[in-house]
Amino acid sequence: MKILIATDMEGITGVTTWDQVTPGHAEYARFRKHMTEDVNAAIRGASDAGAEDVIIADGHWNGSNILIEELDPRARLNTGSPSPFSMMEGIGENIDGVMFIGYHARNGSPNAILDHTWSSRTVANVWLNDILTGEYGLNAAVAGQFGVPVIMVSGDQTACAQVTELLGDVETAIVKQASSRFAAECLAPDVTREMICMSAERAVQRLAHGDVPEPFVLDTPITVTVEFFTSDMADRATRIPFTKREGTRVSMTVQEMASAYNGFRAMVMLALG
Ligand SMILES: [Zn+2]
């Protein structure tokens, strides 16, 4: 069995502030270590359940957060940016299941640590067809194009709830209970690592038995719609051919999810200016 562990940082053990996930800030050094250890716990669980090959995608910021010198040697690490599949680098038809580690809720969510959708400065909302979603939905749909299901998520209670609402009964490891965007009741690393390891193990066992939710496959053609915070952001995003604009919403319609993902990333990059 081959597993892709797609990672982010906002839903990592103990994280509650931007400083903790921002390279260059003093606090960041502590939390990239925690990110590495949350990921190692998932590798341990997946391997214990029989996964022979584990690929990691470092999906936060510039994709250079996980400390390779502390990485479980059973895994390989996709790191650096830009990569063709970004937060899902390593996805393909040979992957059997995807895990989301350190994930966060979509922008605008109550009781959600550092809730945002891809870019906290530009993106208010994202829809795939008519489904309001966050990074978890974009990334799950990319896996869906390759026929791969998401089988597990770790993060706060709201991130885990949004993933299960969209995808069904995936394994969850709730490492903190958020009470606002910047406050949560956090479990200690010794506790969360055990939870993540157990969830990952159960997820791979369930995958082996065919007892996991279906891959997230969108109806085609796929329309991706981005609502930006301001008009100038929408102005810049509409420089991409074949986009449509309504107010601060810019959309494009394409034939497959990989193109929608590229188009979405291009719109956000342009909007940033
Ligand atoms: Zn992130």
Image: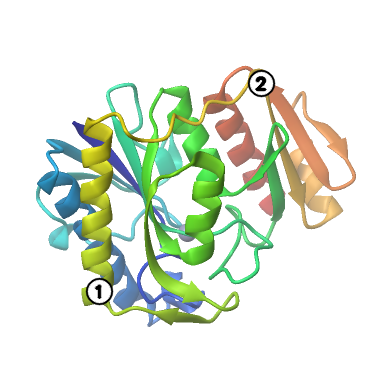
Q: Where is mark 2, residue-wise?
A: 254
Q: Position of residue 188 (x, y in %)?
A: 29, 80
Query: Is the shortest distance between ligand 1 and the CB of mark 2 under 8 Å?
Result: no
The amino acid pointed to by label 1 is Val
Residue 191's disc number: 1
Relative depth, front residue between 225 and 205: 205
How far apart are the two marked residues, 1 and 2, measured between alpha carbons? 44 Å
Q: Residue at image x 20%, y 58%?
A: 40
Instruction: Classify 10 Å Cα crowding around label 2: few (below 14), some (14-19), many (20 and above).
Output: some
Rendered-image quadrant of the N terminus: top left
Q: Tell us which disc is closer to us: 1 or 2.
A: 1
From the top left corner, tell me how far across and down residue 35 is, in percent.
31, 65
Mark yes or no: residue 157 visible.
Answer: yes
Residue 100: percent from the left, percent from the top? 38, 49
What secondary structure is marked by label 2? strand
Quarter of the image holding residue 182? bottom right
Closer to the camera in the image, 174 or 18: 174
Q: Quadrant of residue 122?
A: bottom right
Q: Amino acid at mark 2?
A: Val
Residue, x 27% and y 34% (percent of image)?
A: 207
Q: Is residue 62 above or below residue 55?
A: below
